[in-house]
Amino acid sequence: MKGPLAVILILTAASASAQTADADTSWKKTAVLNVNFTQAQFDNWAPGGEDAWSWQSDLLPKIVHESSSVQWMNTGKFSFGQAKVGDMGSRKSADEIRLESVLTWKVGTWVNPYAAVTGLTQFAPGYAYDGDSKTEVSGFLDPGYFTQSAGLGVQPNPHLRTRFGAALKESVTRNHPAPYADDPKTAKVEKIRAEPGAEWVTDADWKLHDNILFTSKLETFANFKGLNAVDVNWDNVFSSKITKLISVSFNVRVTYDRDVSRKRQIKQVLGVGLSYTIL
């Protein structure tokens, strides 16, 4: 945990120094709250069916400091949701905490050096279900993923940003070291795994129509010890504003981590609900 905290302190100090040096500093703060809820109920329904409900809430904060010499972008994603079908108990359908801080020094027009730190975990325990029994397989910071990186970033236009650099990725666990951090080739049970490597991250957002926005984030990490196994996280969201408060979103997320599963993982969510800009 010392690595992520150290990078955060470095980024904070660098940004504070930049603010002192520049008179044209500015901060932009936004936060969007999405709440989706669906429900189905049956009473003497001949074709059959089971009562069901589900809900999900997403909070998406963004704080950007912009000056003539630096850009400091801080983003977050806090998601949680549950679903219930029939007589089964409610189960988690969404759970994510994601934080990212990227400090870019403006030394060129398109290409600039950067330093970044990211963190990923979840709020509540996750379970694997087998009939009426369940087994806990994950929890808060179990696993937790932290990545520190530095390199060069390219931003050819306001809608596309990409960066490439050297990185250190840490996988932190407590009660569930396998398969997230433990090395099965050793007799010792490792609860922390540190992997030096390289990262490539691309962010894109395009306005496809007056009220349709497409956002995409592609994160890749290659361990220097095995470049043939690249970790991939690709998150895509199509969102449409129907009215001032009502929105529709379609989210497709594809991940691949050979240490967790030899097969790619896919998550798809279609949501209709309320969307409100807090800041």
Image (spheres, rainbow, N blue to C red):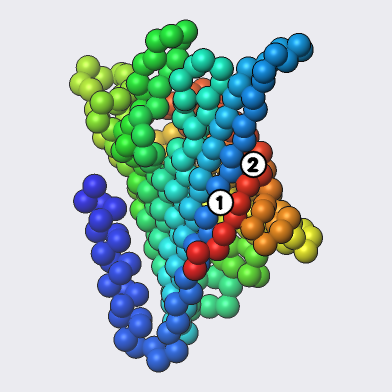
Q: Residue 222: give x, y in percent of width and height.
A: 47, 41
Q: State the residue at coordinates (35%, 83%).
A: 19
- Which of 55 and 131 lies nearest the eye of the viewer? 55
Q: Is residue 210 above or below residue 141?
A: below
The answer to whether residue 71 shows anywhere in this view is no
Q: State the residue at coordinates (25%, 26%).
A: 175
Kindly state the secondary structure of the residue where label 2 is placed: strand
Callout 1 amino acid: Asn
Q: Residue 60: give x, y in percent of width and height.
A: 50, 56
Question: Which badge, 2 or 1, comes first in the chain's sequence?
Answer: 1
Q: Which residue is mark 2?
A: 271
Extreme-front residue of the structure: 44
- Are discs 2 and 1 less than 8 Å apart at CB? yes
Q: Which mark is drawn over residue 237?
A: none
- Which of 28 and 80 lies nearest the eye of the viewer? 80
Q: Residue 228: give x, y in percent of width and height.
A: 51, 33
Q: Is residue 79 above or below residue 102?
A: above
Q: Which residue is mark 1?
A: 34
Quarter of the image where one finds residue 24: bottom left
Q: Is residue 92 above or below residue 118?
A: above
Q: CA distance from mark 2 to mark 1?
A: 10 Å
Left or right: residue 143 versus residue 158 is left
Q: State the residue at coordinates (29%, 59%).
A: 7
Q: State the residue at coordinates (56%, 21%).
A: 85
Instruction: Count residues near mark 1 (Cα–Cα under 10 Å), then give few for <14, some for 14-19, many for 20+.
Output: many
Quarter of the image where one finds residue 250: top right
Q: Is residue 203 above or below residue 218?
A: below
The answer to whether residue 185 shows anywhere in this view is yes
Left or right: residue 121 versus residue 272 is left
Q: Residue 64: give x, y in percent of width and height.
A: 46, 71
Left or right: residue 134 versus residue 68 is left
Callout 2 amino acid: Gly
